[in-house]
Image: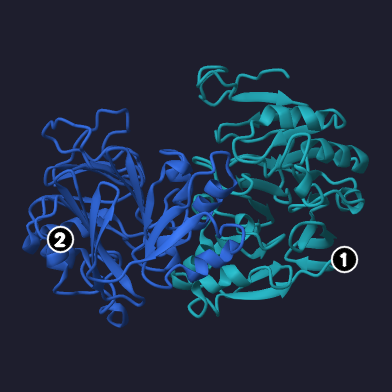
Chain colours: A cyan, B blue
Amino acid sequence: MRVFRPDHGLPPFSSVLGLPLIATVGKVVVSWNGTEVALRRQSTRSVSSRVVKLTVLGGCGAWPAADQACSGYLVEQEGFSVLIDPGYATMPRLLALARAEEIDAVLVSHGHPDHCADLNPLLRARALGEARPPALPVYAPPGALDAVLRLDERMLADSFVLHDLAPSRELEIGPFRLNTWALPHHVPNAGLRLSGAGKTMAYTGDTGPAGTLVDLARDADLLLAEATYPEEVPEEDAPYLSTALQAGRTAAAAGVARLLLTHLWPGTPPEPALAAAAQSYSGDLAVASRGVTVRL
Amino acid sequence: MRVFRPDHGLPPFSSVLGLPLIATVGKVVVSWNGTEVALRRQSTRSVSSRVVKLTVLGGCGAWPAADQACSGYLVEQEGFSVLIDPGYATMPRLLALARAEEIDAVLVSHGHPDHCADLNPLLRARALGEARPPALPVYAPPGALDAVLRLDERMLADSFVLHDLAPSRELEIGPFRLNTWALPHHVPNAGLRLSGAGKTMAYTGDTGPAGTLVDLARDADLLLAEATYPEEVPEEDAPYLSTALQAGRTAAAAGVARLLLTHLWPGTPPEPALAAAAQSYSGDLAVASRGVTVRL
């Protein structure tokens, strides 16, 4: 793993608690320790208005670690902004990038609160703020948001329109086409494949092993893959969660251009996850943490 | 209002978006824009192990603004840590200061999620992390946490012990004595007066005007007072929320040593709130935002 000295004023390698801050893995610049830095292809690419941009708000599994947030991904194309999985503590990260009324749609993979709890403050900001935007389209598996929406039941009732995310569906959402897969988790979980501007990203949500993951990710420009553990899921959760090792195999089999590992268990360092995925996947590879951006 | 040039490397006055970053009001150093800086008395005080320390995790009303958090206050004395009001996005701030298992008790003023939503990830961190601490004592008005605890019902059932916070009660919580007042809000709201090591802090939760606020705050070393608006609450909420003007009057009438205004509506600058409170209160005065600390 070659260490890269960043050019944006961050401390050099090993200057912070003896940990590497930035490294390159495959062709992508990787940050950890929550440092905010663009995740860039080292080859220079022209960026057009039709680029699809992903910004990671947070990537912690289960609960948000110090100064981090749980799952949360902002996907933008042609001025259309889709928020995927507004997990715990993602809202102040989102509002550092966009106004609440600028979000055009929300996609929720499943109803665990580390993937959807902060939908509630987003709806508050829209319902109670000055802009008063139209009702927000929210797509989630049936019933997934029942508990979160009960946090503020009546006050927010007009602030959203809920759409059921059924498996094996194709939907148009702004400039994006969305395809869904039912994937195995403790609760119904929708794998999401989002295409626009000739680019495709695939997101597993939280999932156990499934043959359809390769279909979900086939030839994608980016696979954002839950990888709670580096190499082995504890036995009782093995049908419902994945490893970085498995994510690497899926990425290789599907021929994806980039693999972004996410939902690492709090306290898991990125190195073993990256190393496990790299056993079978030789393309661009990184770990999602807040501030990481990917331009497709 | 005298402008103070800080000594910790922050940009000078007016260098960031033309806004003052730091100012002194009364005798206390105030930060805004979310800058992290200790709120210090300008007189040097010896700090003993029996000092009571308050750290603000967040102070936004309603929803967390960019890079901020909602209500959340860590109070520490003699190694005993009480978390008051774990609002949205407070968890990653808390875990930057303490491990989840180091929290000894949680007090919740009322059941609105901007005051209690992140109890859920705190319980997750304790139930699913490696330390497996004993069940966390959680004090809240009856029923206030029903919705939040439903986010993860069964998984977290053994991770906490819920105690009803009835009004006009006196409880011992570690080295602290807690007294409670029923205060007017849209939902049952407990005013909290916490005493330990010869020091006392009073917290209003969210409250409309009430004569008993002066009893709650009488001679306190710190009054942490909801001040959603600077000078006027919109008519429909006037019985249930407060202004900085009212908080200043309460602080003056109660003879408190310091007044920390909190729960400002997102986007409200601190200046008009500070100015409104200073109309009647001449003591130490500041606005709560993340990273502000007060040693009593």
Q: Is residue B257 above or below residue B246?
A: above
Q: Image point 79% across, 38% down: which residue?
A: A258
Relative to residue A219, is residue B44 drawn left or right? Answer: left
Q: Is residue A64 above or below residue A182?
A: above
| Residue neighbourhood size for the residue with mark 1, other residues' Cα within 10 Å, grouped as few (<14), some (14–19), many (≥20) | few
Q: Image point 45% across, 48% down: which residue?
A: B67
Disc 1 designates what residue?
A168
Q: Is residue B105 above or below residue A282?
A: below
Relative to residue A190, is residue A30 drawn left or right? Answer: left
Residue B169 or residue A50, whichever sits in front: B169
In which image quadrant can residue B180 be found? Answer: bottom left
Q: Horizontal and vertical percent for residue B52?
A: 23, 42
Relative to residue B76, is residue A246 drawn left or right? Answer: right
Amino acid type at mark 1: Ser
Label 2 sits on a secondary structure element that is: helix
Residue A83 or residue B259, whichever sits in front: B259
Disc 2 designates what residue?
B217
